[in-house]
Image: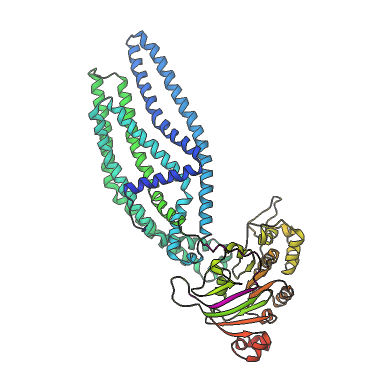
Amino acid sequence: MAANKKLTTRQQLRAIAGVGKLTFQTAPGAVVFKLVGSIIDAVLPIITTFFAAKTTTALASAYAGNTRAGHQVIIYILLTSLFGVIMTVWRSLDSYVQAKMRYVVETRVSNQMFRQFLSLDFWRYDDKDTADLYDRAQKFSQFFAWVFDRVATILSQLIALVSAIAALLFVNTTLALLILLALIPGVWAQFKLSREQIRHWNENVEVRRSLNLIEWNMLQPRFISELRLYNMVDYLLKLRSKLRDKDENQRIIIERRSIPMRLLADTLEAAAEVGALIWVGLQIIHRKQPIGQFLYVQQIVSRAISSASSLVSTMSSIDEDVANLFDYQQFMDLPQQRGGGQKISAVPETIVFADVSFHYPGSEKDVLRHVNLRINKHEHVAIVGENGAGKSTLIKLLTGLYHPTAGSLHLDQINITDVDIASWHRQLGVLQQEFIAYGFATARENVRFGDVDAADDQSRLEAALEAAEATNFVKKLPKGMNSYVNTWMEDDDGNKGVDLSGGQWQRLALARDFYRHSPIIILDEPTSAIDALAEARIFDRLFKQEKRTVITISHRLSTIKKADIIYMLKDGVIVETGTHDELIAQKGEFYRMFEAQIGD
């Protein structure tokens, strides 16, 4: 759906029905309860008003000397009180059901949203159109339960409006029609305003995204030093104000343009209410209506006007979210990343790139060109090259996040496009340059997240920490492995978490990879923040594990020199292949890249 497309009335009604359907699938009992509640909320006040009017008439009659009227007064008071108690009890129960339903619905919808986002084809995370669609869909998903609650309110207000007009018909048909006509301008004005607000929202998605990113950067403690050193604080605050003005000022202008029409609508409604009261007052004076009719008409007219106003206000408040339902559904319908049906149950004997070329979606420039390489089981392979040579892209193809745009990648005899990708991932342990630092977790959990499907194994944890050269610094943490590694966290005993250095975080992430104990390890610049001696010891241990396939990318000669085979990438092409000694002897691209380190 285009960002500036307006919803027709039919589309809006279909969208509201869609909200009800999705909610019913999640919490059917709560939906039925809300529907019944909508009818009760709409009808009970009118019934109460009816008996209140009867009470007033009976009181006047009793005051005039009618003894039978005195008994009627008591009955009407008791009935009015009874309906008031029923309404109070119902609303208390309704409050609980709303809270319960909101929790259930929000949990299910948000889980579905997260699962869908994390299962998309990988190229979509770099696609602007998908990002825009996700932003709009996420906004709807966050308020889904709230939207249904408003839909139920709309239904209640609509029933209340119809009931009020119907109740006026019993008094005077002309009066009911005049009140109905007086409500139309206000309804139209409010809907017109909501349409403009929706269009403005959709046209300013990028402005709000920039604003959110600026605010996020300014509130990250690790960025504050750079912001101050480069005098960026005032600049970003001014840019933030400029973006806010661009977004919010236009909203204010839209509101201002709507003032004349809204004033006219309010004037018509007020005039209709005053006119109705004058009419019923004259009717009572001329004894054509009982005295209680004044209260009845006053309350019903007031309820009709307030119901119409609330109906429009509520529909306007969800109009944008209802429109975003289409974006939500479109996002949820995006195809998830799917592999084939062939499962990888054991480590492949060979991984073969056969004349592989690749370019990213939306670009025609090949990042990899005619790549041919072979990785044998239990082999230790290094992939080297300058930044931008295509090394990380090659790893993305190897892990199945992307597929070749030309050529093929085979695991034994199986094309990776035919592989059940989850079964392939179970064979891999991957540590990338941008690994996840789980700041909400302890050091122990950060390591154990390498294999959450396995039981918590203390000896396995200790071995992983030792292999990653992380044992010493973890032991020095306030509670050892059970310490939080984020100063914003605090355990049950009041112990605050601690900050880790970049090198310590890398060791913890590397320990997570060792804990996974996968048969194939892929390391993309895994030790850039670790000192050279510690790195050498880590890789000595790693390369001694003869029953594991190790694929590493590094710019340190000490890391890759013990590899069984080295592939040298340049501008997306493999230009040299061989062992460390063979490539040094050639004095080609590999030699020139590492010449300074060779001299050391």
User: What percent of the width, then of the height, locates residue 415?
Assistant: 55, 70
The residue lying furthest to the right in this view is 459
Residue 199, horizontal then vertical, whole percent: 34, 55
- Image vertical order of residue 286 relative to residue 428, above or below: above
Name the residue rendered at 48%, 72% in the picture.
Answer: 360
**Rendering coords of residue 127 (x, y %):** 45, 66
Name the residue rendered at 54%, 60% in the picture: 219
Tell me which residue sits at (42%, 39%) in the image: 152
User: Is residue 547 a member of the stretch shown in magenta?
Assistant: no
Observer-nearest of 24 and 547: 547
* The C terminus - image quarter: bottom right
Answer whether residue 356 is magenta in the image: yes
- Location of residue 67 by image quarter: top left
| For residue 451, side relative to residue 176 (left or right) | right
Range shown magenta? 337-359
Left or right: residue 518 versus residue 57 is right
